[in-house]
Image: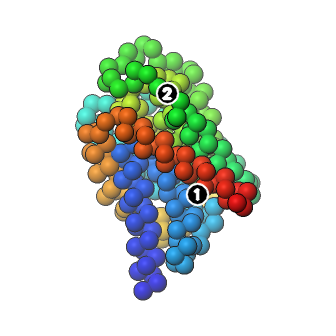
Amino acid sequence: MSSLMFILTIFIIGFLGSFISGMVGIGGAIINFPMLLYIPAMLGVAHFTSYEVSGITAIQVFFASVSGALAYRKGGYLNKTIVMYMGISILAGSLAGAYLSSFMAENEIDMVYGLLALAAAVMMFVPKKGLDSNEYDISRFNGIWASILAFIVGIGAGIVGAGGAFMLVPIMLLVLKIPVRMTIAASLAITFISSIGSAAGKILTGQILYGPAAIMIIASLISSPMGAKLGKKMDTKVLQGILAVLILVTAIKIWLDLFDV
């Protein structure tokens, strides 16, 4: 019974996280990291450390993001120029971050995660104008500036085992002024590229628990395309609101735990 409960718990966490990730354009780490850290321990089925959770989410994000990106590609929202500039930079950053994480203490990884989530939450609540249109003049896209931002995000993402989309989405919306659905599609594709570096770094440094990771992968492949399909039909303001609330709640929870409140 305990092993069945363990499998069901991990599967449900992976399913919910990946469904929401496909819908709002993230890899799922912003949701799955805290759920894996707290829910199995609360139910008494498992207790994962931050190292183990970051390893599991690194693998899960890889599969959730690629399946979500493929679903959005069919709608014509995927821009290759944006993906190329930001994808290569975030891959380099995530490789560096994953390597750095092997030298960090568990509470330091949690703090990096908390800082990223707090910054993303602040950006998501800043008003954004003119982002509902699917028309976008790619000549306005600043590839160098986008690459620098993606590299910085990649370092933080690699440390916590994330794809970095929970930071990329607000940056693409607020700083780079890319329309919402194009942002979601591009962020999933960029997150897939980023997760190659994160996952490779975690595997090479021995931070992966393959059993729970396999369960999360199966859940991701099922639910991420379902979330992407729903996301293409939803109002863009609703999508932004869902992501903003998710990031804010996660940031608050992480910081409360860091200070033992």
What amino acid is at disc 1? Ser
For the point 25% across and 34% down, which residue is it? 75
- Quadrant in which the C terminus is drawn: bottom right
Q: How far apart, in angstroms, are the residues tagged by discs 2 and 1?
A: 31 Å
The label nearer to you, 2 versus 1, is 2
**Residue 70 in view, yes or no:** no
For this orientation, the residue located farthest to the bottom is 1
Q: Residues within 10 Å of mark 2 (few under 14, many from 20)?
A: few
- For disc 1, the marked residue is 54
Q: Residue at x 59, y 69 (%)?
A: 48
Query: Quick check: 116 left or right of 232?
Result: right
Single out the residue that lies furthest toward the top. 139
Residue 252 visible in the displayed image: yes
Q: Which mark is residue 152?
A: none
User: Quarter-wise, where is residue 83 in the image?
Assistant: top left
* Residue bearing mark 2: 127
CB under 8 Å between callouts 2 and 1?
no
Judge from the rendering whether residue 107 lies leftward or rightward of residue 23; answer left or right. Answer: right
